[in-house]
Structure formats: C-alpha cells, structure tokens
Amino acid sequence: MTAKITQKITPFLWFDSQAEEAANHYIAIFGGDSRILGITHYAASAPGETGTVMTVDFQLAGQRFTALNGGPQFTFTEAVSLAVSCADQEEIDRFWTGLGEGGEEGPCGWLKDKYGLSWQIVPAELPELLGSGAEKADRVMAAVMDMKKLDLKTLRDA
C-alpha cells in the first residue's frame, strides 16, 4: 500500500524530550486548522527509551510539521526560523505574546520561543511596504530595524 502524500516538504523539528509538549503549545497558539495528526513511540530496537514519545506529527494553520524527541545532541539556532504572516496588529500581538512566552525577544520581529525555536512575526503587507519605492522602503526598513515586536501603524506611516 502506498501512503498518500499530502505535503511534499514537512519541516522536521528536533527537540530533546519536549516534542509533544511543544506541539500542543503551538496548537494552542495557532488554533483553527491546527491539531495533532499522530504520535509514534520508541520501540525496543530504537535508541530512545522504549514506550516514550518518538515523533509527533502535527498541523499548524494547515501546515504539517514533525517534532522528534531526539535528545540533547542538537539544538535550534537562528539559522532556521519560521515566519508567521499576520493580517493585522492584533495577530502580531497575539503571536508575539504566545510564542514569546518564556522565550527571548529579538530585533526586527524575531523571537525565540521557550524551546529555542526562532520565529519571525511579521505583517503580511511588509513585502508590499518594502516594495513601495526606494525612499519608502528605506524608511520602512529603518523603522523595522528600530523595533523588536513590529508595529504595523508605524511601518505604514514610515
């Protein structure tokens, strides 16, 4: 039997031992079309403790992810981040607060969550604002560089 491919590329996130906790945390923040799709457990022949959670397949806003409890060998870095495109300031504020809880704020709309995963919380219209001519783009970028959490009104007014 051949499995049906529903998404060609699935981000695979390596956690020490918090894969299920992290997936549930993200699902609570994103809501809507977000849910656990399946959980696998380590078998006796696998490197993890038999019976503990190995992977968690989950969906955030319709996008599929897999979280692995792989141990402490690897950790997240800013070299890879997940960008959240937000419709308005209310969404920016909600994602910034939810994902940033217990984490670390960074510059220019970036933050690390409590698991160390980097996120970019950005207004959906940012590319349009940056493509509005050289002078406008320069003012918008200067405003972005001065912020942590992005303020949509300030960016529009730049």
Image (cartoon, helix red, strand yellow):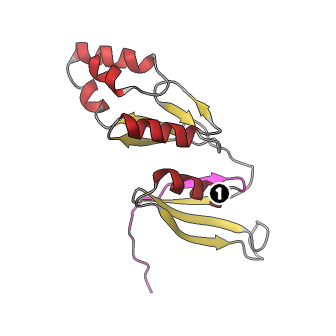
Q: Which residues are magenta?
A: 1-17
Q: Residue at x 55, y 27 (%)?
A: 106
Image position, residue 144 (x, y; %): 40, 21
If the image is split into quadrants, where does the C terminus sit?
top left
Q: Secondary structure at mark 1?
A: helix
In the image shown, does 119 or 101 lie closer to the viewer?
Answer: 101
Q: Residue at x 60, y 71 (%)?
A: 39
Q: Is residue 73 above or below residue 110?
A: below
Amino acid type, residue under disc 1 in the picture: Glu
Q: Residue furthest left?
A: 133
The verdict on residue 85 being magenta is: no
Give the prevailing secondary structure in the magenta stretch. loop
Q: Residue at x 78, y 73 (%)?
A: 50
Image position, residue 7 (x, y; %): 39, 64
Image position, residue 45 (x, y; %): 76, 75
Q: Which residue is mark 1?
A: 21
Image position, residue 41 (x, y; %): 68, 72
